[in-house]
Image (cartoon, rainbow, N blue to C red):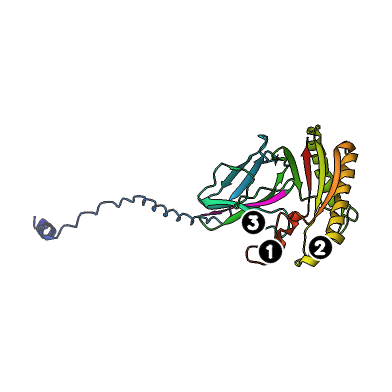
Amino acid sequence: MKKLLPILALLLVTGFVLSCATPPPPAPPPTIFEEAPPPPPPPPPPPPPPVKDTTGPVLSMSLAPEYFSPDGDGVDDVLTVTLKATDESAIVGWKIEIHEPEPPYLLFSEWGGEGNPPANLKWDGRSNKGELVQSASDYPFTFSATDFEGNSSQIEGVIGVDILVIRVGDTLKVQVPSIVFGSNSGGFDGLSPDIIAANDYILKRIAVVLNKFSTYKITVEGHANPLATTAAAKQREETTELQPLSQARAKAVVDYLVRLGVKQDRLSAIGMGGTKPVVSYADDKGQPNRDNWWKNRRVEFILVK
């Protein structure tokens, strides 16, 4: 019994010590690893800046009939001009200019306006001053337009005028300034192949027209451009230069028309010299009217029953 007392005492002390000791802290909860959310997508790139329109309008212009003849006979008297202008930007203005057929190609007629051009225009062959187009002539034109960005475009072409038969009382008259003769010559010598071909085309058209009026006699008049300014000089110029030159040219035209099938007995030639100019020597300001003298150098066909 005495041997058990120390053991019991030790157990009591140990139990007391254990009962007084601080209990260990509870174990921490287990760590839970969650997957991180994906980062947000980057913002979209800014839109590219708008591309500035740097090209001019696309233009088109068509004519009907191909050759018009505003001579009052009710056939092809009016030219229909069909216009179109397209562009990425708005059209802010347009213009058509028609120029005379001979150098220096003065302005003959024009139209224009703001915004888009009209789909169609009608032209009676008159200039801004009321002058009628010349027979058998090609009038150069330009058609231009400008868009909102200031870009411009222009196209070019020619308006072909057919043979005009103008009635003056009981007489029919065809006036043609576009027949070209050799320099200071009464004929067609020394001309380039292109001019010879153009003359041939014009005279063939004249022959067709004259043969339509088969009951008419035809006087072919040659006209020249007078340049002298004093009475004595005018008389000398007329007698020695203009009258014989215009007579020779009228005769050359008659011979050509006969070869084209117009009957000889219907035709006669006369040289008018510079006695009937259609354009005066000087303009309204008293200056030489050189830009229009070409209209005096012409051939007229007078048709009389």
Q: Amino acid at mark 3?
A: Leu
| Up-down relation of residue 183 to residue 257 (above or below) | below
| Label 1 CA crowd tier, 10 Å (few <14, some 14–19, many 20+) | few
First to last magenta residue range? 138-147
Main secondary structure along the magenta-highlighted residues: strand
Q: Is residue 78 left or right of residue 9?
A: right
Is 140 in the magenta?
yes
| Label 2 CA crowd tier, 10 Å (few <14, some 14–19, many 20+) | few
Q: For the residues carrying marks 2 and 3, which lies nearer the camera in this image?
A: 2
Residue 107: mark = 3
| Up-down relation of residue 172 to residue 229 (above or below) | above
Q: Position of residue 148 (x, y in %)?
A: 50, 55
Task: Give the alpha-carbon distance from disc 3 to disc 1, as whole Å.
Answer: 19 Å
Task: Give the alpha-carbon distance from disc 2 to disc 3, as whole Å.
Answer: 34 Å
Residue 274: mark = none
Cβ–Cβ under 8 Å for marks 3 and 1: no
Q: Nearer the viewer, residue 229 or 293?
A: 229
Q: Which residue position is annotated with label 1?
A: 282
Q: Residue at x 71, y 45 (%)?
A: 160
Q: Position of residue 30 (x, y in %)?
A: 28, 51
Q: Amino acid at mark 1?
A: Ala
> Residue 285's image quarter?
bottom right
Q: Residue at x 78, y 39 (%)?
A: 303
Residue 235: mark = 2
Please state the total of marks drawn on the protein image: 3
Q: Secondary structure at mark 2?
A: helix
